Amino acid sequence: MLIRHASDILPSEITAPAIHAGRRHFVRNLLAAGAGISLGPLASASTAEAPPFGTPKASPFSLRDEKPTAFKSITSYGNFYEFGPDKDSPARHAHRLRPRPWSVTIDGEVKNAKTFGIEDILAWPALEERIYRLRCVEGWSAVIPWIGFPFSELLKRIEPTGNAKFVEFWSLADPEQMPFVRLPFLDWPYREALRLDEAKHPLTILAVGMYGEVMPKQNGAPLRLVVPWKYGFKSAKSIVRIRFVEKQPETSWIKAAPDEYGFYSNVNPEVPHKRWSQSHERRLGEFFKRKTLPFNGYADQVAGLYAGMDLHKNF
Ligand code: MTE
């Protein structure tokens, strides 16, 4: 039950980062043959359970004037390579993910390393709904009402040492639940990272739900990062570890294709991807393209983080 058909989307938009069409089919067929994975019709991997959290507060950071993308579009079209390379792979296969029990380990340059159960995190106050733009590096975008906590809520509970300069986010990599981590087309576990000041920025959230519901499995249950001024791949899904480190870490995408995916990955219409322009984007569910905005429209809030930096070099 695909919402968008191939004819709606330009090839540059559907090409997975660093994964060309031939490779996608290779990976798909190899896995289907080797691991007995069904490539059958789309199954909804979203859950019908009641949200395990209270009513989130509306946030002043929410967009006011842009209509949220249809829930069905954003839950049936996306990237979660642990479940396969196609846009419908996450919706087909993420039903295998078991978001309970779940814990998140915080370690590295912190005074007290700690492991939180997901229930502990869900009980934190300061739960908010944040309607944000999401811009994928491939050229599609969406407007999503996330439910989550400012990242600073975590910092209140964890004291980073003076050496902490970067924060690394590790996704789960369990081959039993995530069949594609058996294939080394990315360096698993999926790892992304931010500079500490980016992580601390009030726009950065740890999301536990969307559209008033618990986070659908294909969108990164039970806990994912959302950094709205950066390309979507910075926002790691299904996080199990958050590590504070001194040196800029290598991320899975930088390891895969360093000339295509820079550490910063701020949405920047002036810096094309190696294989396509980043000047325009297509909102899921819309026909005409729109212009991509610097920092995905959040320049007023975040441009200051990069004062004095050459963002063509630090892309
Ligand atoms: N996190 C993990 N663990 N694995 C992934 O493949 N894909 C990224 C990001 N987080 C990805 C991930 C990319 S490329 C995008 S665009 C967003 O998730 C998509 O999030 P969405 O499916 O909620 O739109």
Image (spheres, helix red, strand yellow):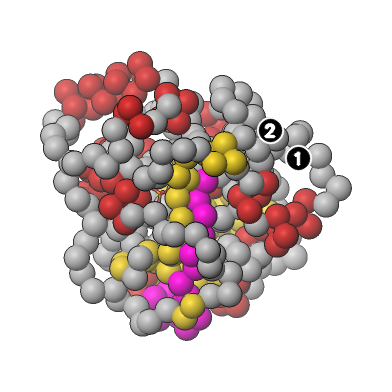
Q: Is residue 132 magenta?
A: yes
In the depicted structure, whether residue 191 falls above or below residue 151? above
Q: Looking at the image, is mark 1 or mark 2 nearer the viewer?
A: 2
Q: Is residue 193 left or right of residue 212?
A: right
What amino acid type should be assigned to the residue bearing mark 1? Leu
What amino acid type should be assigned to the residue bearing mark 2? Val
Q: Is residue 38 left or right of residue 72?
A: left
Ligand 1 visible in quadrant: top left
Residue drawn at x 75%, y 54% as measured from the top left: 303
Q: Position of residue 268 (x, y in %)?
A: 66, 41
- In this view, the residue farthest toward the right is 308
Q: Secondary structure at mark 1?
A: loop
Q: Which mark is residue 250?
A: none
Residue drawn at x 50%, y 51% as measured from the top left: 134
Residue drawn at x 26%, y 64% as measured from the top left: 100
The quadrant of the rendering that contains the C terminus is top right
Q: Is residue 85 left or right of residue 125?
A: left
The magenta span reads: 120-135
Residue 146 in view here: yes
* Residue that mark 1 sits on: 311
In the depicted structure, whether residue 277 falls above or below residue 268? above
In the depicted structure, whether residue 248 falls above or below residue 48? above
Q: Are marks 1 and 2 in contact (CB under 8 Å)?
A: yes
Q: Is mark 2 within 8 Å of ligand 1?
A: no
The quadrant of the rendering that contains the N terminus is top left
Q: Position of residue 178 (x, y in %)?
A: 28, 43
* Residue that mark 2 sits on: 271
Q: Secondary structure at mark 2?
A: loop
